[in-house]
Every structure is written in C-alpha cells, then in structure tokens.
Image: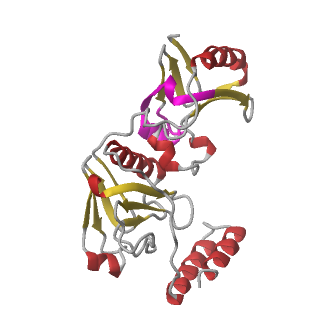
Amino acid sequence: MGDVLAGFHAVWEFESDSVLIRYERGIRTPRLFQALGERRVPLSALEGVTLTPGKRGTVVLRAQVRPGADPLMEAADGQLREACDPYRLVLPAERETLAEYYAEELRPLLTESGPAERYLVAAPEAPLRFKSYDAKVSFDGKAVRFRWSWTGASSAKWKAGDQSYPVSALSGVEWRSPEVFEGHLRLLPRDPAGGERREQPDQDPAAVVFGLGYGPVHESLPFAAAVLAAVRSRGAVAAVTATTPRRDPADIAERIRHLGELHQAGLVTDEEFSAKKAELLAEL
C-alpha cells in the first residue's frame, strides 16, 4: 500500500507485507511508546483490524495481534492500560473515513489467524537494564543478572548473593505490572527446585520486586519481552502460571502494614485496600 496514517502518538505506514509503526516523542506520548521507538509488524502477525469511536472526538484504529506473535504482548499478559496498547492508533474523528479506508484495504491481506508458532514481531534489543526496588537488573542477550541493593533486598536475597541466569537455564518470564500492588519480574528456571512451588518475589533470588518509581512499565516490560524472546529462540517453552505458597503470619502482618501506608498516602483506594487485605489474610 505504501501509505501513511498519522495519529496522535504514532504514525502507521502500510507496506505490502507489514505495518511500520513509528511512535512519536513528546510529553503526552506514553513512555512505553517512546521506549519502543519503532516497530515493524508483519501482516502475518495480525489477524484483524477494528475501527471504533474513541473519547472526546476521536476514533481508534486497532490491529489485533495473533497470540504468541509478539513477545511484548505475551509478556504483558493483558496487563497494559488501554492508553499504552502499542496496537492502538487514536485519530481525530474527522479522519474516520480515511481510517476506515485503510482498515478495509488491510483486512483482505490478513490471512493468518490463531496462535503463532514463533514470534513474528522483533523484541527490544539487548543490552537492557533497569532498577527495581531491590536490585539493579541487566540483560546482555545471553544472561540476566541481579545485583542486590543493600537498602531494598531481603536477607534471603543477600544470603543467596548476586545472581546470574543464562538464557539456556530459563523456561520463561513472569511479569506483574509495577502499576499494581506486588508487581515483580520473576525468571522461571527450566528445572525448578521444589517442583512448581515458588517463594514470594521478595524472598526469591530469581525475582525482583517493583515499587513506586522502580521497574516502570516502559523499562521492565521491554526487558521481560527481550528475555522471553531469547528463551523462545533457544526452544524453551515459556510459562507464566504461579503457585503461591502459604505465608508466614509475620510476613502477612508486615505486608498489611505496608499496604496501610500506601492507603494513607493515597496511592491505594479504599476498595483496593480492603480487597488486598482480605486476599492477604486468606493466605494464612
């Protein structure tokens, strides 16, 4: 097609076999978009396109990516806020006719559907790094390294020492958004000790925990996607399910205290406080 459609935070360029998405830079552009910069999405990675009314005089053109085609979306596992969806293009309502034209032109070209056998969209490139609440985290394309922070890491992590995990030893990555309580990034080993039972993230040397200003989405999610893609390229199967062990009562009390501090600071709503407190008490 070779045409360009410009929205508020991105520009889509339609090519014969792909859509090139270039994300704009600016104070109103989601930081995840700025971190991604540019992405080429093969048409084989898409299974549909929709055009719907948006908010305040806008329309939204959205490409529907196939499950398993994009490591970023697989790592996100449905946790991204709508405004941070990299496959949404928001346009002024007066461009609706033009957007519908491109949607109609694109639909017949999307001949693939269902889960993809491999990643079709490139992952963010290593080296990557970010700072979590309890560690400095880095990935050079071959191994993930955790360097513990003396102010945030638990005694269990200090006892285990700084960690280095070769991609060949991993089966996947578990990412829980820093925008929710108990956000974290956990590396899943190919041969987990103790079966499927896992420690809580703040006690697990294979996990780092997020917090206010630590492990933000635009840093930790591309990181998780890059690791996931590296694992997949070595033939490992990624897993994201977790089995939560019973917690020590003292640990529950400490987490409820911390939750109360977040509530008093206005970072957690009354409903979120009550729901999470009940969830923690249920783990006793």
Instruction: Residue at 50%, 25% (x, y): give it.
Output: 44
Nearest to the observer: residue 230 or residue 15: 230
Quadrant of the snapshot with the C terminus: bottom right
Instruction: Residue at 40%, 54% (x, y): give it.
Output: 172
Q: Can residue 179 be seen in this snapshot?
A: yes
Q: Is residue 111 magenta?
A: no
Image position of 91 with respect to 244: above or below: above
Image position of 148 with respect to 155: above or below: above
Give the image location of residue 123, x and y in percent: 39, 39
Give the colouring mode of the picture.
secondary structure
Residue 214 in the figure: left or right of residue 86: left
Residue 79 in the figure: left or right of residue 186: right
Q: Quadrant of residue 257?
A: bottom right
Q: Is residue 28 magenta?
A: yes
Total labels drawn? 0
Nearest to the observer: residue 226 or residue 118: 118
Instruction: Residue at 52%, 67% (x, y): give it.
Output: 182
Give the image location of residue 159, x and y in percent: 27, 80
Q: Quadrant of residue 253?
A: bottom right
Q: Which residues are magenta?
A: 25-48
Instruction: Residue at 72%, 69% (x, y): give it.
Output: 271
Q: Can residue 31 be seen in this snapshot?
A: no
Give the image location of residue 33, x and y in percent: 48, 38
Give the image location of residue 138, x and y in percent: 29, 54
Q: Quadrant of residue 109?
A: top right
